Amino acid sequence: MYVPSSNRACRSKSIQTIFLYPAVSCLGFVNERPIHVVAADDAQAEDTIIITVYEPKSEDWVEDFTKRRA
């Protein structure tokens, strides 16, 4: 299993890494709406693979959308 060490998927200053194993989950905002992107780096191909993109529901996440509510 490859664990992305370079964190290529979340390189933008406006995107925050939420977790990093085995894929990376990134938080960004588009028109003030939160967007989560789950991606994984493919070291051999030197590519980043987008697994899913979704808008997190506010009732499922803490206020800053970085952690799920218990």
Image: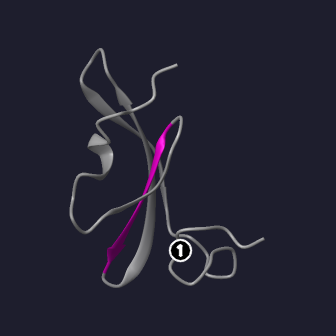
Callout 1: helix, strand or loop? Answer: loop
Question: Does the magenta run of residues contain 27?
Answer: yes
Please provide the residue range marked out in magenta: 23-30
**Is disc 1 surrounded by few (<14), some (14 to 19) or many (20+) residues within 10 Å?**
many
The outermost residue toward the front is 5
| Amino acid identity at mark 1 | Phe
The relative height of residue 35 versus residue 64 in the rendered view (above or below) is above
Q: Nearer the viewer, residue 22 or 28?
A: 22
Q: Quadrant of residue 35?
A: bottom left
The outermost residue toward the right is 70
Q: Residue at x 45, y 22 (%)?
A: 2
Which residue position holds label 1?
A: 65
- Percent of width and height locating residue 60: 69, 74
- Percent of width and height locating residue 28: 35, 68
> Total label count?
1
Q: Nearer the viewer, residue 18 or 40?
A: 18
- Percent of width and height locating residue 37: 43, 55
Q: Quadrant of residue 32?
A: bottom left
**Magenta region's main secondary structure?**
strand
Q: Residue at x 53, y 34 (%)?
A: 22
- Percent of width and height locating residue 49: 37, 35
The relative height of residue 69 versus residue 52 in the rendered view (above or below) is below
Decide if residue 19 is on the left or right side of residue 15.
right
Q: Quadrant of residue 45?
A: top left
Question: Does the magenta run of residues contain 68?
Answer: no
Q: Residue at x 61, y 76 (%)?
A: 57
Q: Residue at x 30, y 52 (%)?
A: 10
Decide if residue 10 is on the left or right side of residue 66.
left
Specify the color scheme.
Answer: one colour
Decide if residue 64 is on the left or right side of residue 44.
right
The relative height of residue 47 versus residue 61 in the rendered view (above or below) is above
Quadrant location of the C terminus in the rendered image: bottom right
